[in-house]
Image (cartoon, grey):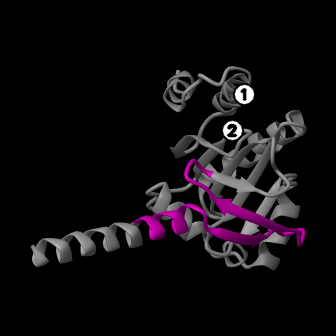
Amino acid sequence: MKKIMILLTLSIFFASVSQAEENKASTLQISATDTAGLVHNITGTEQGLNIKGLEGKIVFLEFFGHKCPPCLASIPHLITLQNKYKDKLAIVSIEVQGLSNDELITFAKEKGINYITIAEEKAGDLVDYISQRAQWSGSIPFLVALDTKGNVQFVQAGMLPEASLEELISQLSKADEQPAQTAASIETNTSK
């Protein structure tokens, strides 16, 4: 009986520790500083990310590289989308091929980038956090699309054409109006 009580107590203890670790991981606080010098406070949640100041917007969180041909080809599309949907879309791009913050400032200026850019050195633990949560292996471009509530609705490794990104914005906008929209149906609709 004593052994059973000890085992039960240990089981409860380890379950509590495991749950505490899980809760800690899902509510991680991260600060990332963009190339404009603005600090973005990001909270990891069970369903996605809350990015202070971007609440109520669809967020495209993109990991890219300055030497990656598909990433470079995506930049004009992202510029166009940011212009077209500036009231309801925020694009946050994190450069993961080693540009320093100063180098990324120059790169963004040369490319005419009009959306948020963050050098990996200024991204805090965000890159590692996404790697773990989204099981991202480092392929770029890598897109995580969040709805207006900060919930992850779409994840894609590889470049998406501008038309597919527009369809994704449309689907995420409709999901706002119709809460029954699921990530699976958004993914199905964008892959057409």
Q: Residue at x 54, y 32 (%)?
A: 183
Of the pair 39 and 191, the residue shown nearer to us: 39
Q: Distance from label 2 to label 1 (Cα)?
A: 8 Å
- Where residue 140 appears, as percent x and y from the top left, is 55, 56
Nearer-N-terminus badge (2/1): 2
Q: Which residue is mark 2?
A: 147
Under tag 1, what secondary structure? helix
Of the pair 121 and 100, the residue shown nearer to us: 121
Judged left or right of residue 31, residue 164 is left
* Quarter of the image with the N terminus in it: bottom left
Does 130 appear above or below 125?
above
Image-quadrant location for residue 16: bottom left
Label 2 crowd (10 A; few <14 / some 14-19 / many >=20): many
Label 1 crowd (10 A; few <14 / some 14-19 / many >=20): some
Residue 37 shown in magenta: yes
Does the image show residue 138?
no
- Where residue 47 appears, as percent x and y from the top left, is 57, 47
Q: Which range of residues does the magenta coloring cover?
A: 19-48
- Where residue 135 appears, as percent x and y from the top left, is 43, 57
Tell me the kind of residue under disc 2: Asp
Does 19 appear above or below 71?
below
Judged left or right of residue 159, residue 121 is right
Q: Which residue is mark 1?
A: 176
Q: Residue at x 90, y 68 (%)?
A: 36
Judged left or right of residue 113, residue 188 is left
Does 115 appear above or below 17?
above
Whether the residues at callouts 2 and 1 have beta carbons within 8 Å, the answer is: yes
Does the image show residue 93?
yes
Under tag 2, what secondary structure? loop
